[in-house]
Image (cartoon, rainbow, N blue to C red):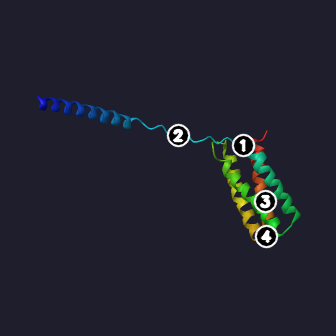
Amino acid sequence: MRRLVAVVALGAMLALMASLVLDSAQGQDKPKKQKKKPPRVASVHVIMEKIVFPNCKALGAGLKKGDTSEEALHELAESAALLNEAGFLLMQNKRCPSKTWAQAAARLRRCSAVVYEKLEAKDLQGAQKAFKAMTQACKNCHDAHKK
């Protein structure tokens, strides 16, 4: 009798364990919920108003001033670097509405990188030339998209 009770108890435990294993395995079949990435909330207007415009204005004024002190060149190079980053931001998060936009953003990235390199080399004339090409790219895009 004891043996029968032990066998029944063992069977019940095995059934319970099998049920738990099956429940656990079934839970693994369910796709895991992926966490949503936080949205990129900066609008094109904000990027232009808070990053592009002030840095473009500072860079243009600084290049025109012609101060070649270490501090002035460093500040101008920082503005060029931020404009370069803006060229990437303007393409991300489905912000790019056209080929003109994409070409202007690419030119913004290329020209701002040249401006940066020229400033690092203390080549003010080279930086001014690259800045002029960069602002032409901005004009092309603004002509197409800015109302």
Residue receiving disc 1: 44
What x and y, as percent, mark residue 123? 79, 70
- Depth check, mark 1 against mark 2: the one in front is 2
Q: Residue at x 38, y 35 (%)?
A: 27
Give the spatial CA distance, label 2 vs label 3. Answer: 42 Å
Where does label 4 land, which residue? 123
- Mark nearer the N terminus (1 vs 2): 2
User: Residue 78: which quarter of the image?
Assistant: bottom right
Q: Are marks 2 and 4 in contact (CB under 8 Å)?
A: no
Q: Mark 3 or mark 2, which is nearer the start of the sequence?
A: 2
Mark 2 touching mark 3, by CB under 8 A?
no
Q: Which residue is mark 3?
A: 131
Residue at 81% x, 66% y is 71
Q: How far is disc 1 from disc 2 in space, using C-alphas?
A: 26 Å
- Mark 1 to mark 3: distance in Å? 21 Å
Q: On the image, numbered disc 2 is attached to which residue?
A: 35
Question: Nearer the N terminus, badge 4 or badge 1?
Answer: 1
